[in-house]
Image (tube, grey):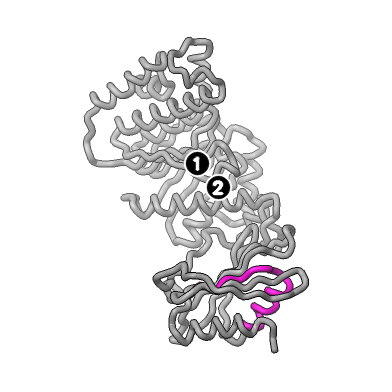
Amino acid sequence: MNKFEPFFEKIEQSLQQDDFVKLTLSKPLSKQNELQNVYLRLIYLKEEQFFQFTYRYKTNDQVKNHSFEEAKEILEDLLLNAFRFATLFALSEDTQCFISKKKVVTIKKQYPSFKNKLPEHHDNIKTKKVEKSDYLFHLGISDKEGNIIHKMADKYRQINKYLEIIDDLIKTSDLPNKINIVDMGSGKGYLTFALYDYLTNKKGHDVTVTGIELREKLVNYCNEIAQKCKFNNLHFVCKPIEEYKEKNIDILIALHACDTATDDALYKGIISNATLIVTAPCCHKQIRQQLKGSQQDNPILKYGIFKERQYEMLTDTMRALLLEKENYQTKIFEFISNEHTRKNVMLVGKKSSRKVDTTVIDKKINDLKQEFGVTEHYLEELMNSK
């Protein structure tokens, strides 16, 4: 008798009782194994029932569909050679299958974890935003076969999260048919290329994307890759942000533009009446240097690390208020996990027709300045000079 047969019988029983929820494989035999987990759920394709296998690797997910008989063979191989633990979740009970180092199989029943079944329609699958593309290879994110290079896995996750955020923002914004996007401080262009490729080739939008970058080498490098990839409406320009004069901007992006370059970018977005302004602020030196050596009554600011974080929050809160003063609805949220980068805050402004009480906002700004001894915020200086 197959040592996994009792476990497979439990799966079959859950199918017959129509209470199968899902099945997971965990605890890889080796920590070096690229395959971290496998998840199974039921789906229907053309009215036929299949097990959908989601293979969770360190850098990506892969999805395959199999019949029950095929699934049993694959599960047996995975449990013998890749994983120590499998859990069958059903509405009646959970069943755990543990495989020891000596390949002894132990099966245990537990109380059910779920009260409802998962959706069984293929359309509910969450897909990655980034598909295989030449730009990933040219930028050193993937190899020629399209496999993500291990050391670039965090960057790949960041790209997917970024596109998810931008996609949601665009869906809820009133943008023209032809969208003009400017990415200020585009650097090596990882996110710039990803955004152009996603909006043009996957979503079918008519977009023009311009990357603004001060380092000429990076500008030439990015323009060469854009030509190789035949990204005809993606261009990179070498100049400081404050010298960029084009005012036809529908979406302004500034991710990790250093210090007051974020404020220069925000100002360009404001005076261009951009529909969307998306920034990931960086450095926050202006307020910190302005308050350097000043005595603070707040005991939290006695400690250097707290002082640093407080000044970051102060800088970005004032930026958000200044955007609100210009009729932008603002949000500040975590962009990606702290484990990838500490500079993980995103500040987004979406143009609104709703009028605001500027006197109330001015009071909030002035109260913050008075509390912390700030004379003026750089973005405020730019806006006052309009």
Residue at image location 36% in from the left, 21% down from the top? 368
Any part of residue 287 in sight: no
Local SS, label 2? helix
The residue that mark 1 highlights is 183
Q: Are marks 2 and 1 in contact (CB under 8 Å)?
A: yes
Q: Amino acid at mark 2?
A: Leu
Occupied quadrant, residue 92: bottom left
Per the rendered image, the range of residues in magenta is 72-89
Name the spot of residue 212 as percent of width and height, x first.
Answer: 53, 37
Residue at image location 34% in from the left, 52% down from the top? 172
Q: Is residue 362 above or below residue 129?
A: above
Q: Amino acid at mark 1?
A: Asp
Q: Is residue 269 above or below residue 24?
A: above
Residue at image location 53% in from the left, 22% down from the top? 285
Residue at image location 41% in from the left, 39% down from the top? 332
Local SS, label 1? strand
Q: Is residue 30 above or below residue 345?
A: below
Assess disc 2: are there few (<14), some (14-19) or many (≥20) residues with their C-alpha within 10 Å of its C-alpha: many
Assess disc 1: are there few (<14), some (14-19) or many (≥20) residues with their C-alpha within 10 Å of its C-alpha: many
Badge nearest the viewer, 2 or 1: 2
* Mark 2 vs mark 1, CA separation in Å: 9 Å
The residue that mark 2 highlights is 191
Name the spot of residue 280 as percent of width and height, x first.
Answer: 49, 38
